[in-house]
Amino acid sequence: MSYVNYSLRFLCLSAVAVGMSFSTISCSSSRKAEKSPVETFVQPCSDYEGAEGTIHAWAMGKSDSETTARKKAQAAATADLAAQVQKTVQSTIDEYGTILSEGGQAASKVLLVEKTRTTVDQTLRGATIVCDRWAKDEATGQHVNYIVMEIKAEPFVQAVQDVLKPAGQQVDGDLLRQIFIKHIGQ
């Protein structure tokens, strides 16, 4: 074979190889994208957005029994609310105490701390469920309850004022409310 034959044969084979690569590229690009094996799951009630001046707690309870799943969800949400309220109240009392005049600051702060504990307990018992969804865990067959509970600042501050009135203490409700709302979620 001559040099020309080898060159032609090489060109033909090159053209076939290039053509095959284009066809595999075009075939693979025309295929639809494969679905990801990872599923995206959005927790029910996790997208709940309440009004400003509210404390929210999201929780989930899972059990073979619907009643037990509900109790677990409520207990977890109440514990979360209690922690958030405690933190918010402590920050509020600290800031409110520094604003008070120095003469009555210590006595007023002690009384405020004492009375807000009672109010926090009452408020937690009155927390409202604002989102309540159920699901069934297909893998285990258990019932799953998702809830969001909330406490609003306005009734809480009013309850603190009502508790302090019989003790002879006046609280600047507007200032207390502003400070409380400021510390929610911090």
Image: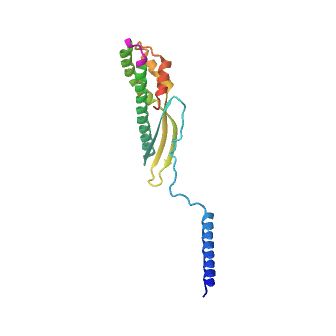
Q: Point out the stretch of residues depicted in magenta.
A: 98-103
Predominant SS along the magenta part: helix
Q: x, y (%) of residue 69?
A: 44, 44
**Residue located at (44% from left, 21% from top):** 160
Is the residue 76 above or below the residue 29 in the image? above
Instruction: Work out which quarter of the rendered image holds the N terminus and state it.
Output: bottom right
Q: Is residue 101 magenta?
A: yes
The residue furthest bottom is: 1
Look at the image and tell me in which quarter the C terminus lies.
top left
Q: Is residue 182 above or below residue 77?
A: above
Q: Is residue 68 above or below residue 169?
A: below
Residue 116 location, quadrant: top left
Instruction: Name which residue lies at 53% across and 38% down.
Output: 48
Residue in front for this viewpoint, 27 or 12: 12
| 50 shown above or below 9 | above
Q: Is residue 176 left or right of residue 110?
A: right
Work out which residue is located at the far front of the displayed protein and give it: 3
Q: Residue at x 42, y 22 (%)?
A: 95
> Percent x, y for residue 11?
62, 77
**Near-viewer residue (53 or 186):** 186
Picture coordinates of residue 66, whole percent (x, y): 45, 45
